[in-house]
Amino acid sequence: MTTRKPKPGVEPEQAPALLDECRRCALWEHATQPVPGNGPRHALVMIVGEQPGDHEDLQGKPFVGPAGAMLDRALEETGVAREDVYVTNAVKHFKWEPRGKRRLHKTPAQREIDACHYWLDRETSDVVPKVIVVLGSTALKSVLRDAKATLQASMGHAIEHEGHVVVATYHPSFALRATEKETRERAYQAIVEALRDAHRIVARHRKER
Ligand code: URA
């Protein structure tokens, strides 16, 4: 992510230059480190998840735990190399609560999603992806800047949004954790289908350039 000076009239704490310095919400206090996006600067596909999990918080990279393994499998099935896509999260710090010795994921609040939109916005303007694949409802709300957006209404069709094409699908954690095997398989297939759609849109875009 490029370093930028705050705009005149904007308090520096509201416009931190570095993710490490971010205090726009309180999540940094209990996280090991912020987790920035990862991938080529001008990737045509950006994938946005919810927030780092336990593994990501410790390693400082997005999607390196079980959800990341599923995402990698889906990408491979689609014929898209992970190295060619930019992968990030709507929220850059791990939000968790203790359960015994474990740190359990807690869904970020809307105010935390809104606070972190500052970083997603910067990533989107740096990378300028053609397609943004949103994994799950937090990512969807953040990317569309619409707290009322739902996966149900947004899946199955591409959404034109601020010069990008947004393709919405389930979060891999949903496909991992659903109790019914059939639901898990259906969710996984929906993720693969969304990545295929992204691949097709990018291929069409390349031809037209
Ligand atoms: N879940 C996410 O949404 N993002 C990650 O980076 C890991 C798990």
Image (cartoon, grey):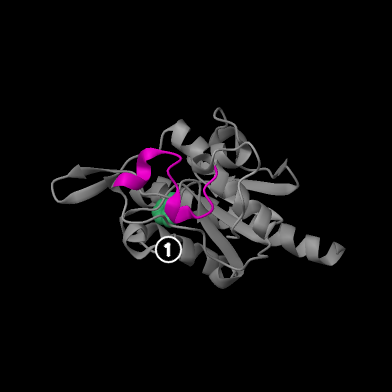
Outermost residue to the right: 208
Residue 26 part of the magenta segment: yes
In this view, 83 is above or below 186 = below
Q: Position of residue 55 (x, y in %)?
A: 32, 60
Whether residue 158 is visible: yes
Which residue lies at the image location 63% right of the left edge and 48% below the top edge? 167
Which residue lies at the image location 59% right of the left edge and 31% below the top edge? 146
Image quarter (top left, top right, bottom left or bottom right) of the N terminus: bottom right
- Secondary structure of the residue carrying numbered label 1: loop
Please tell me which residue lies in front, 64 or 116: 116
Q: Position of residue 20 (x, y in %)?
A: 43, 55
Please tell me which residue lies in front, 109 or 69: 109
In this view, 142 is above or below 42 = above
Which residue lies at the image location 66% right of the left edge and 58% below the top edge? 126
- Quarter residue 197 falls in: bottom right
Q: Amino acid at mark 1?
A: Lys
Outermost residue to the front: 8
Name the residue tied to disc 1.
61
Q: Is residue 189 left or right of residue 96?
A: right
Q: Position of residue 56 (x, y in %)?
A: 37, 59
- Badge 1: few (under 14), some or many (20 or more) residues near its Cα, within 10 Å? many
Whether residue 179 is visible: no
Specify whether tag 1 is near ligand 1 (CB below 8 Å).
Answer: yes
Please tell me which residue lies in front, 186 or 203: 203
What's drawn in magenta, residue-wise?
15-29
- Quarter residue 59 falls in: bottom left
Q: Position of residue 11 (x, y in %)?
A: 54, 38
Please tell me which residue lies in front, 144 or 16: 16
Outermost residue to the top: 148
Image quarter (top left, top right, bottom left or bottom right) of the C terminus: bottom right
- Quarter residue 34 falls in: bottom left
Residue 195 part of the magenta segment: no
